[in-house]
Image (cartoon, grey):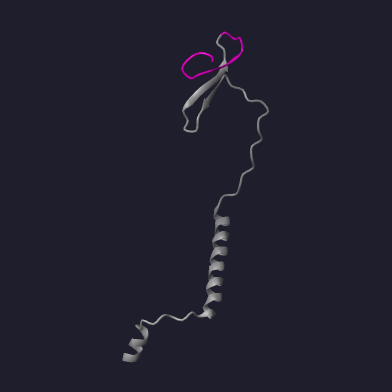
């Protein structure tokens, strides 16, 4: 019993076993393939894209920056003279 205990708790470096590489690589590859297959089953199917409209109609377009702050406005002039581009706070530029 004492020799078995010594063999289990010895401080010698463990020798590299080249026969264990193939099973470990196969287990890793199997896990990766299984993960990809489950991801394909669980993820929703892509939906067909809606066709783009030929005409976009609006009375006003707001120009925003990357954080969503409004930076400008494209709108029809109140007098009906045509489109104007203006800052957020005031009249046309």
90 is within the stretch colored magenta:
yes
Instruction: Pick whichever, 16 or 86, lies toward us.
Output: 16
- Where residue 38 appears, x then y in whole percent? 55, 59
* Residue at 53% over, 20% down: 73
In what quadrant of the picture does the N terminus appear?
Answer: bottom left
- Find the magenta span and give its range: 79-93
Q: Main secondary structure of the magenta part?
A: loop
- Where residue 24 appears, x then y in whole percent? 52, 73
Q: Is residue 56 above or below residue 45?
A: above
Instruction: Pick whichever, 79 or 66, lies toward us.
Output: 66
In what quadrant of the picture does the C terminus appear?
Answer: top right
Q: Residue furthest front?
A: 12
| Viewer can see residue 42 | yes
Q: Is residue 48 above or below residue 67?
A: below
Quarter assignment of residue 77: top right
Q: Residue furthest top?
A: 79
* Residue at 56% over, 67% down: 29
- Where residue 14 appears, x then y in whole percent? 43, 80
Q: Is residue 8 above or below residue 64?
A: below
* Residue at 53% over, 75% down: 21
Instruction: Pick whichever, 31 or 11, lies toward us.
Output: 11
| Viewer can see residue 1 | no
- Where residue 48 appears, x then y in whole percent? 64, 42
Instruction: Pick whichever, 54 or 27, lies toward us.
Output: 27
């Amino acid at each position: 019993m004492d020799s078995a205990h010594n063999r289990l708790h010895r401080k010698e470096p463990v020798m590299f076993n080249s026969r264990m590489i193939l099973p470990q690589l196969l287990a890793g590859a199997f896990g990766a393939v299984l993960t990809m297959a489950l991801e394909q089953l669980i993820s929703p199917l892509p939906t067909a894209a809606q066709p783009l409209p030929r005409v976009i109609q609006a009375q006003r377009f707001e120009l925003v920056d990357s954080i969503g702050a409004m930076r400008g406005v494209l709108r029809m002039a109140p007098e009906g003279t045509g489109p104007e581009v203006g800052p957020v706070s005031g009249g046309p530029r």
